[in-house]
Image (cartoon, rainbow, N blue to C red):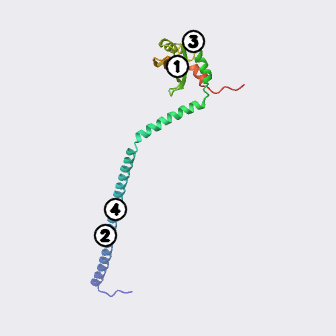
Amino acid sequence: MINLLPPSYRQSLKANRSSTLMKRWLVLTWLAVFGLIIILASGWFYINQQSKNLTQSINSTQTLLNNADLAKTQKDAKNLTNNIKTINKVLSSEIRFSDLIQDIGSVIPPHTILDSLTLSQVNGAIDLSAKAKDYASAAQIAVNLSDPANKIFSKVDIVSVSCANTATQYPCSGVYRALFNKSTQSRYLGVAKEVQ
């Protein structure tokens, strides 16, 4: 095909087409920039809103924890855990109180009686309660129990001794904390003996 248009008119048409194309690209570019600005603004708004929501959630959770007294609950849970560990330890081994009471009874001095035995949470320790006719007999209990020849306790502490002015046969009461020696622990806190 032969182009019969004058060169100046042809140049003008070419420039107009080029100008129209540039205008379209410029409009599309501005629309893209405007769209990106909207996307960035909405993203910033969304992130800012989420941040505020999370801050409110953290504050409300912290308030709930403070109101629930978390420290006291943790302390109670720790005490409960310690008690459960002690119970598990006691249940996992046979404590032969009959043997222990017989051995303690053989070293208790005259004019005294054993009142009670209590396992404490201290590892390998036991609390004993005894009654005596006087202070000297009550003190002699600690001496006899801590004697290394008896091979029962390595150490016995007197927690308290008190005497009442009553006409009972044993007016004095004593509380003692006794720590088993190493060999005694295996004898009384060991695994159950086989029945023969």
Q: Earlier in the sequence, mark 2 or mark 4?
A: 2
Q: Which residue is mark 3?
A: 149
Kindly identify the residue that appears in the image at 32 percent across and 62 percent down. 41
What type is the residue that disc 2 sits on? Trp
Q: Classify mark 1: helix, strand or loop.
A: strand
What type is the residue that disc 4 sits on? Leu
2 vs 174, left or right, is left
Q: Nearer the viewer, residue 170 or 44?
A: 170
Q: Nearer the viewer, mark 2 or mark 3?
A: 3
The Cα–Cα distance between marks 2 and 4, rounded to whole angstroms, is 15 Å
Callout 1 touching callout 4 (CB < 8 Å): no
In the picture, the disc for residue 174 is: none
Callout 1 touching callout 2 (CB < 8 Å): no
Kindly identify the residue that appears in the image at 47 percent across and 36 percent down. 78
What type is the residue that disc 1 sits on? Ala
Q: Is residue 6 above or below residue 190?
A: below
Q: Classify mark 3: helix, strand or loop.
A: helix
Q: Is residue 153 above or below residue 68?
A: above
Q: Which residue is mark 4?
A: 40
The Cα–Cα distance between marks 4 and 3, rounded to whole angstroms, is 87 Å
Q: Nearer the viewer, mark 1 or mark 2?
A: 1
The Cα–Cα distance between marks 1 and 4, rounded to whole angstroms, is 82 Å
Kindly identify the residue that appears in the image at 32 percent across and 79 percent down. 17
Q: Earlier in the sequence, mark 4 or mark 3?
A: 4
Callout 2 touching callout 3 (CB < 8 Å): no
Q: Which residue is mark 2?
A: 30
